[in-house]
Image: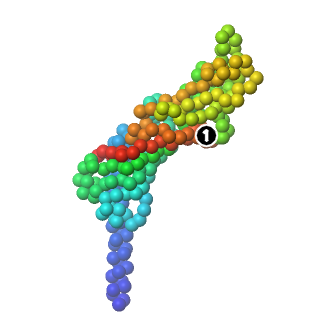
Amino acid sequence: MRKLLIFLIVLVVLLAVVDRVAVAGVQRDLANRIAASADLSGTPTVTIEGIPFLTQALSGRYPEVRFNLGTLTYGGVPVKNLQGVAYNVTAPLADVLQNRANIKAERLTVRGTLTKGTIDKYAPPGVKISGNGQRLVASGEVTVGVNKVRFNAEMGVRVADGSIMLRAEKLEGVPLPDSVARLISYSIPFQGKLPFDVKVTGVRSVTEGLEFSAEATDVPLRG
């Protein structure tokens, strides 16, 4: 009985070691594929969620794969702390071991931050952007007709056609508020420029600037 117990303990330990070694190998392979798919010069950090790992490897399906791409620039737009999750990744073990290209994520989401400096960079001439983590504020001076008009306005943020749109709201004490609002409203273009062909689906104000979310479906992870 004692020998059987020792054997079972050793077996459990060996399986745990094999499990961790295997997950490290597949995470490394997926990291290389994600780097290639996102045209990265470095290798991202990848974590496969869920245990035991071997059951996922044998089934060839990983419900959740998390990755961190760091700070990157897309279409001239710097994105800070770009992180993502690939859901239901189909990766047959034989394809992983032989580096075949038949690996795909059913759905992939990314989330990143645009700093206030980046948001300010894309603002129209004469417009300065600031904020407190809850709302963005535009201030400055623009020319309306032959007159220069100083303004302060809250900026509403939304997603439209793959871009992040900032529109002036609550303009008070200025002549022709609609005309001023048009002059200080603008967009930060992202359409067709983010990795994995994800589309921006949401945006919100945070302490550092704007945090956006984006997603795509049926995303191939090439070798």
Q: Residues within 10 Å of mark 1 (few under 14, many from 20)?
A: some
Against 145, is 40 above or below? below
Left or right: residue 32 compared with residue 178 = left
Q: Name the residue that disc number 1 marks.
A: 205
Q: Secondary structure at mark 1?
A: strand
Out of 152 and 3, give the one closest to the viewer: 152
The answer to which quarter of the image holds residue 50 is bottom left
**Which residue is located at x 25 percent, y 49 percent?**
100
Left or right: residue 172 compared with residue 218 = right
Quarter of the image that includes the N terminus? bottom left
User: Residue 211, image x and y in percent?
Assistant: 55, 41
**Which residue is located at x 62 percent, y 33 percent?**
156
The furthest residue to the top: 146
The furthest residue to the bottom: 1
User: Residue 16, image x and y in percent?
Assistant: 37, 70
Colour scheme shown: rainbow
Q: Is residue 19 visible?
A: yes
**Which residue is located at x 46 percent, y 29 percent?**
76
- Three-letter residue code for mark 1: Ser
User: Residue 8, image x and y in percent?
Assistant: 35, 80
